[in-house]
Amino acid sequence: MARYGSVGFTYAPQFGTQVIVSLLFFFFLIPGIVYGRAVGLFQTGVDVVRQMEKAAVAMASFIVMVFCMAQSIACYNNSNMGGLIAVQGAALLELLPA
């Protein structure tokens, strides 16, 4: 049982999450290679790698954007800014006429 502050919690074993990533990878990789060979797009393993590289380049800007968004959300959560905004907003609402 892991302890975090005064709250105890248990966590799931890592094995399940590691296996699911590998299963999903091969679940999409194998049919993609079979399809590429069937339509004549892939002649050698180099062609497969080139197509994977092309797909990674196409996703690069999205991955960078999501990384920046995740970092912003983590900083927001760690700073407790949400609680401060909530308290200040409640004070502002109390000042408004009914």
Image (tube, rainbow, N blue to C red):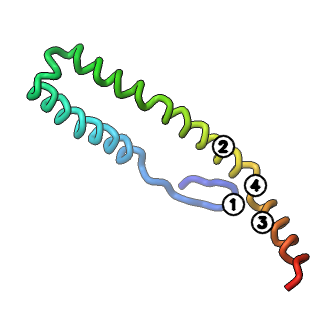
The percent position of residue 1, horizontal first and vertical second, equals 53, 55
Instruction: List the residue tagged with mark 2.
Output: 72
Instruction: List the residue tagged with mark 3.
Output: 86
- Determine the residue positioned at 22% across, 40% down: 27
Instruction: List the residue tagged with mark 1.
Output: 6
Secondary element under disc 4, as helix, strand or loop, is: loop
In this view, the residue farthest toward the bottom is 98
The percent position of residue 65, horizontal first and vertical second, equals 55, 36
Please tell me the numbered disc located at residue 80: 4
Residue type indicated by callout 3: Ala
The percent position of residue 79, horizontal first and vertical second, equals 76, 49
Asked which quadrant contains residue 17, the reply is top left
- Determine the residue positioned at 16% across, 20% down: 42
Could you give the CA–CA distance between mark 2 and mark 4, rounded to whole angstroms?
A: 13 Å
Tell which circle, 1 or 4, labels the residue nearer the N-terminal end. 1
Tell which circle, 1 or 2, labels the residue nearer the N-terminal end. 1
- Which circle, 1 or 4, is nearer the viewer? 4
Could you give the CA–CA distance between mark 3 and mark 4, rounded to whole angstroms?
A: 10 Å
Residue type indicated by callout 1: Ser
